Image: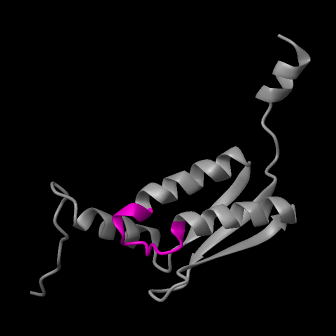
Amino acid sequence: MTDADAQAEEPQPPRGHVRIVYLGPVAPHWEVQSTYGDRGLISAFAERVQARLVLLPPHDPQFRRNRERVARDAERENLILEWDLGEPEEDQSAARDAGRPGAPAPQSRVAD
């Protein structure tokens, strides 16, 4: 194994942190915020994010596919990625599963 191979396998520290925030139902739906990292890198990443998510609210089926693409892009760029969809994580998964065939039905409480 050469030195170049060993360096490629070593985990590198994150190059930046990006937070993607859902602004609401009126376009533009998304804002990309950064707490640290190279401005050029973050700016180029933000442009790609906006291109993928420009007209997609979180409940759109295409959003899920594009969210995965954004996550892979962040991983390639070695960026820490955070999503703020405006609702708790468990509510997001329940809403996503609600329309899926074979998904468990939401449970409701009945007062005695």
Closer to the camera, 104 or 108?
104
Residue 90's x, y, as percent? 40, 68
Image position of 8 (left or right of 65): right
- Magenta-tinted stretch: 53-63
Image position of 92 (left or right of 102): right
Quadrant assignment, res 82: bottom right
The number of numbered discs placed on residues in the rendered structure image is 0
Closer to the camera, 110 or 50?
50
Image position of 69 (left or right of 62): right
Question: Going by the picture, which residue comes out furthest to the top?
Answer: 1
Q: Main secondary structure of the magenta part?
A: loop
Residue occupying the point 71% across, 60% down: 45
Residue 67's x, y, as percent? 50, 59
In this picture, is 36 found above or below 28?
above
Question: Going by the picture, which residue comes out furthest to the left?
Answer: 112
Residue occupying the point 71% across, 74% down: 33
Residue 38's x, y, as percent? 87, 61
**Colour scheme employed for the rendering of this structure:** one colour
Q: Is residue 91 magenta?
A: no
Image position of 38 (left or right of 81): right
Residue occupying the point 58% across, 56% down: 70
Quadrant assignment, res 10: top right
Residue 25's x, y, as percent? 44, 86
